[in-house]
Image (tube, rainbow, N blue to C red):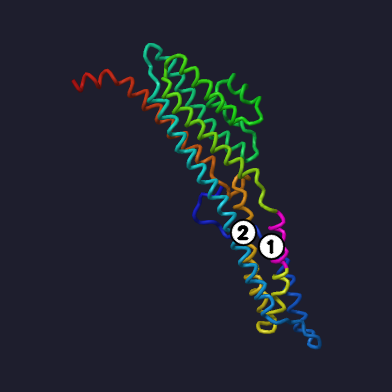
């Protein structure tokens, strides 16, 4: 993913370097033929490529907007995952009652929060098509990791484990019925966010639409040298290359943005978001343990 504000030009033009090389040879050939062959003119009215370029500009603008909408929706969903993960951790830490089973409750809290951290990483890896259990041994126990590995959808399996532990907490009296309902609603919203990401991932951008725009763009680039050769001569080579590069870069941008979960430099920064979630949830867990440990001393100090 790209997290830097300054993107190197080598990266930008590296995406269209072969296309620019072909255009360079093509425009050079047309310029040479125009200068050496004065008997048969090879120019056309400039209005023809200008009209075609206007139409292509509108189509590329529409496609770029649609691609950005997909990318922005993906980022919006992961923003909600950040909020819901913090909400789940906060509810677990504040709803649960230690009582006489303090050690068991602490283990329940830690297991739920560590599993939520693992869920965030696993969801990102699953969306990118990489093994969803990579690196989860730092957060899940050996038996639990083996259990969720049996599922084709590992993040869904971990949400199921969330539900089972929540049911056990209700049976043991660590949470009451109303708190269990609120926790289950938070888990349901996490499941909804996962489903929305999978919808974007599995909904393919119409290939025919992309193909027609690409063919129209190639036709425009092929006609443009004939329209400007009479006015610029050999200077049409850098002119056509500059105009072509602009259109090609816009097309490439739309192609990359339309698939925000394809493990490309322009995809949604899911790993970075998951790391931020992990940092917040770990700090919440440590602070809660510290507050409970200091609770008697603080009560005495207030009195």
Split into 4 quadrants, where in the image is the C terminus?
A: top left
The relative height of residue 40 versus residue 103 in the rendered view (above or below) is below
**Observer-nearest of 160 and 288:** 160
**Main secondary-structure element of the magenta-colored stretch:** helix
Pointer 2: what residue?
A: 63
- Determine the secondary structure under disc 1: helix
Pointer 1: what residue?
A: 213
Residue 100, how many percent across, how many down? 38, 11
Magenta region: 207-218
* Residue 144 image-quadrant placement: top right
Name the side, left or right, on which 64 lies relative to 49: left
- Tell me if residue 299 is in the magenta stretch: no
Q: Distance from label 2 to label 1 (Cα)?
A: 9 Å
- Determine the secondary structure under disc 2: helix
**Numbered mark located on residue 30 in the image:** none
Contact, mark 2 vs mark 1 (Cβ under 8 Å): yes
For the residue carrying disc 1, how many other residues have a C-alpha within 10 Å: few (<14), some (14-19), or many (20+)?
A: some
**Observer-nearest of 242 and 260:** 260
Residue at screen point 48% across, 40% down:
80
* Residue 137 image-quadrant placement: top right
Residue at screen point 42% across, 25% down:
92
Residue at screen point 69% across, 84% down:
230
């Amino acid at each position: 993913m790209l997290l830097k504000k300054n993107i190197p030009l080598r990266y930008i033009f590296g995406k269209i370097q072969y296309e620019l090389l072909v255009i360079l040879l093509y425009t050079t050939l047309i310029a040479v033929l125009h200068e050496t062959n004065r008997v048969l003119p090879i120019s056309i009215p400039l209005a023809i490529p200008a009209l075609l370029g206007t139409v292509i500009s509108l189509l590329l603008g529409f496609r770029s907007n649609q691609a950005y909408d997909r990318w922005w929706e993906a980022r919006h969903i992961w923003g909600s995952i950040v909020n819901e993960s913090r909400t789940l951790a906060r509810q677990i830490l504040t709803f649960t009652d230690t009582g006489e089973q303090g050690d068991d409750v602490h283990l329940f809290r830690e297991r739920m929060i560590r599993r939520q951290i693992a869920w965030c990483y696993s969801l990102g890896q699953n969306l990118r098509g990489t093994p969803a259990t990579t690196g989860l041994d730092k957060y899940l126990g050996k038996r639990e990791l083996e259990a969720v590995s049996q599922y084709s959808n590992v993040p869904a399996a971990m949400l199921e484990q969330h539900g089972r532990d929540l049911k056990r907490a209700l049976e043991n009296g660590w949470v009451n019925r109303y708190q269990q309902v609120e926790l289950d609603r938070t888990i349901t919203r996490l499941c909804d966010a996962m489903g929305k990401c999978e919808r974007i991932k599995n909904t393919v951008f119409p290939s025919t639409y992309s193909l027609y725009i690409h063919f129209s763009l190639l036709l425009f680039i092929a006609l443009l040298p004939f329209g400007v050769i009479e006015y610029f001569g050999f200077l049409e080579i850098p002119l056509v290359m500059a105009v072509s590069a602009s259109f090609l870069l816009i097309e490439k941008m739309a192609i990359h943005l339309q698939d925000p979960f394809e493990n490309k430099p322009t995809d949604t920064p899911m790993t970075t978001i998951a790391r931020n979630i992990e940092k917040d949830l770990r700090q919440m867990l440590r602070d809660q343990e510290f507050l409970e440990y200091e609770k008697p001393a603080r009560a005495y100090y207030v009195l």
